[in-house]
Amino acid sequence: MRRGVRMRVTGRALLGSVAILLAGCGSSSPTTPQVQAPTGLNYSLNPASYPKGVAIAPNTPSSGGGAVSSYAVNPALPAGLTLNTTTGVITGTPGTAAPATNYTVTATNAGGSASVGLSITVTQTAATATQLAITTQPATTSEGVALPASVRVEIRDADGALVTNATNTVTLAIGNNAGNGTLSGTQTAAAVAGVATFPGLSINQAGTAYTLTAAANGLTGTTSTPFNVLINFISVGVGSFTTCGVSVSGAAYCWGRNDLGQLGDGTIVNRSLPTRVVAPGGVQFLAVAQNGRDASAGVANCGRTTTGAAYCWGSGSAGNIGDGALLDRLTATLVAAPGGVAFNSITAGGVHSCGTTAGGAGYCWGIGVRGALGDGTGLNRPLPTQVPAPGGGLFATIGAGSGTTCGTTQAGAAYCWGAGTSSQIGDGAAVDRLSPTLVAAPGGVTFAAAQAGGSVSCGLAFGGVVYCWGSGANGQIGDGANATRATPVPVTAPGGVTFSRLATSVIHSCALSTTGAAYCWGANTVGQLGDGTLTDRNVPTAVSMPVGVTFTAISAGQDHSCGLTAQGAIYCWGWNTNGQLGDGTTVSPRLTPVRVAR
C-alpha cells in the first residue's frame, strides 16, 4: 500500500471549479414577498349600544388578510369615546346621549384597506334630577295681560341634561317684586317628560325688572331673567299742566307739574314719567266716566274707586279736595261725601270738582265764585254740595271746566252754570249763572254729554254731532268762523265723520270719530291740536295719528291733549315744559302725538 499520495490540482482545474460555482448563482435581484390588504373587518360589538356616563368595555376589531398598520373613523365618535389608531380598539365613557349613528372604520396597510360600518347608540341613563332651569323666559308684558308665551321649566340632572322621566311638581312665584304685584294663572304644574309648563300667567301691577322663581322639593331652584310689566291704561284725563291715567289694576298714575301735589305721589317734584298716586291700602280706582275725565287734572285731581268713593289730591286752599279742610294734599284723600252717597262719575275742573250718583244726583265742591258749584250762592264749598237739578230732573253726566260747569239730564237736556260772560252758558245771554240753566239747543237736539271748557262749552248730541257755544276767538266753536255763539251751533265735521267722544278745554276741543280717529279745533299755539302745525283751526282737523293707532278715549287740557288706545297706551301732544306728555322729556312743544312711557 502506497502512503502519502498527493493530489495535485492544476491551475486549469481550479479555474474550472470556480466557474462551475459561479454558474450556480443567478445574476438577478432577490424577490420580496407581496403584503395582503386587510379583509373582513368587523368589531366584537356591532351594533353597539352604550349608556351615557358609563365606561364601555373595549370594542375590539378583527380582520383577515395582512396585518393592519392604522385605523381611522368617520364621522367622529360620540363625545367621550376614542378610537386607538394603532390597534383600532374603541374605549371611553360616552358623555352625551345620541341616537343610532353609523360610523365608518377603515383599516389600512401597505397592501390596501378594508372598511366596516359600525352602528353606535348612546342611551340616556336613568339620571338623577337635581336642578331646575327656566327655558322659556318671561317677556315684556302689560299688567293684567297674560305673558306672551307659556313659561317652561325643565328638570335637569347634574350635567344639565333634561331628565325625560321626571314628573316632579314645580311651583312658580314672583322673585323680585318690582311693583308689589300679584301673580295670577297656573302657578303649580307637574312635569311631563321632564318639562313643567305654565300658561296664562299675568302680573297685576306694573314694574321694572320683575323675576320669577321656580321651585320643586329636593331640587335646586332657579330664577328667570328680569322682565318688565308695563302700565296698561284704561282711562286718561288731562288738566292744566298735568296728565293722569288709571290702569287695569286700579292704580292711578300722574305726571307733569307737581308744585301743589297734584301728582299725588307725596312730593312736589315734577315728573316727566307716569308716577303712581299714593292711595290708602286697598283703594282701587275705576276708569269709568261718561265724560272721559275720571282721573283728570287741574290744580287738583280726583278719581273714583270701585266702591263709589271719590278721592282728590293737589291744591285744597279753596276746598277743592272736598275733605272739609282748606289744605293741599300730596296723596289721595277721601272726599267727605254725604252719608250714603256713592259716585258713578267724577270730574275735576280748574278749581272745583263734581260728581254724579247712580240715582242722578249731582254734587260739586271747591271754588264757587261766579256760580261754578251751581248751588245758587257763588260761595266756596270744602265739602260736596248738591246741585239742584231743574224741574226735578236727574243728572246723567257733569263736566267741570274752568269756572263753568255743564251737565246733561237723563232726558238729554243740557244745563250749564257758573261763568257766562263769553256766552258759554248757552242760554243766549252773556251773564254768569249761579244755578243750572237750560242750554238753548236747536229743536230736537238731545245731548249724551256736555262739558265746560274755559270760554267755550260743547256737547255731544245723540247721533254723533258736536255742538259748541261761547267764545270763538281762536276757532274753538268749530263752525268755520271765529265768532261768539250764544247758543249751540254744530261744528263743521269732515264729510262722513260721526263723533263718539268729546273733550273740551279752555280754548280748544277734541273729539273722536266712531272709527277711533281724533280731530281737534281751536287754539294751536303750542301744538295742542296735534296736526303738526302751530296754526289755529276753526273746524275739526285730523290729528296726525301714528301709523296704525286709533283711540278709544280722548281728553283735552289747557295746552295739551291725549288719547287712549285699546291696547292700553296713551299718546299726548302739545305743551310739555312740565313733562305733562309723559315721554320722559320736557321737549316742547310736541306737534304730533308721542307715546307716554309705560
Image (tube, rainbow, N blue to C red):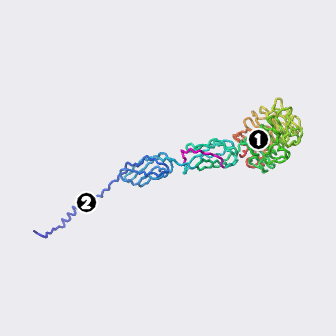
- What predominant SS class does the magenta segment belong to? loop
Q: Which residue is mark 1?
A: 305
Front in this rendered view, residue 124 or 533: 124
Report helix, strand or loop for mark 2.
loop
Please provide percent x and percent y for residue 534: 78, 44
Q: Is residue 40 left or right of residue 514?
A: left
Residue type for callout 2: Cys
Front in this rendered view, residue 399 or 193: 193
Can residue 371 be seen?
yes
Q: Residue 328's mark? A: none
Q: Residue 25's mark? A: 2
Is 60 colored magenta in this rendering?
no
Q: Is residue 215 left or right of residue 104?
A: right
Please provide percent x and percent y for residue 143: 69, 43
Can residue 524 be seen?
no
Is 165 colored magenta in this rendering?
yes
Q: In the rendered view of the protein, which quadrant contains the N terminus?
A: bottom left
C-alpha separation, residue under disc 1 versus residue under disc 2: 125 Å
For discs 1 and 2, the disc positioned in front in the rendered view = 1
- In the image, residue 71 above or below residue 319: below
Report helix, strand or loop for mark 1.
loop
Residue occupying the far bottom of the picture: 4
- In the image, residue 443 above or below residue 17: above
- In the image, residue 169 above or below residue 33: above
Q: Are marks 1 and 2 in contact (CB under 8 Å)?
A: no
Residue type for callout 1: Thr
Which numbered disc, 1 or 2, marks the residue that appears first in the sequence? Answer: 2
Q: Which residues are magenta?
A: 161-175
Please provide percent x and percent y for residue 316: 83, 46
Front in this rendered view, residue 433 or 465: 433
Find residue 389 and report its image quarter: top right
Crowding at dot 1, Cα within 10 Å, few <14 / some 14-19 / many 20+, comes out as many
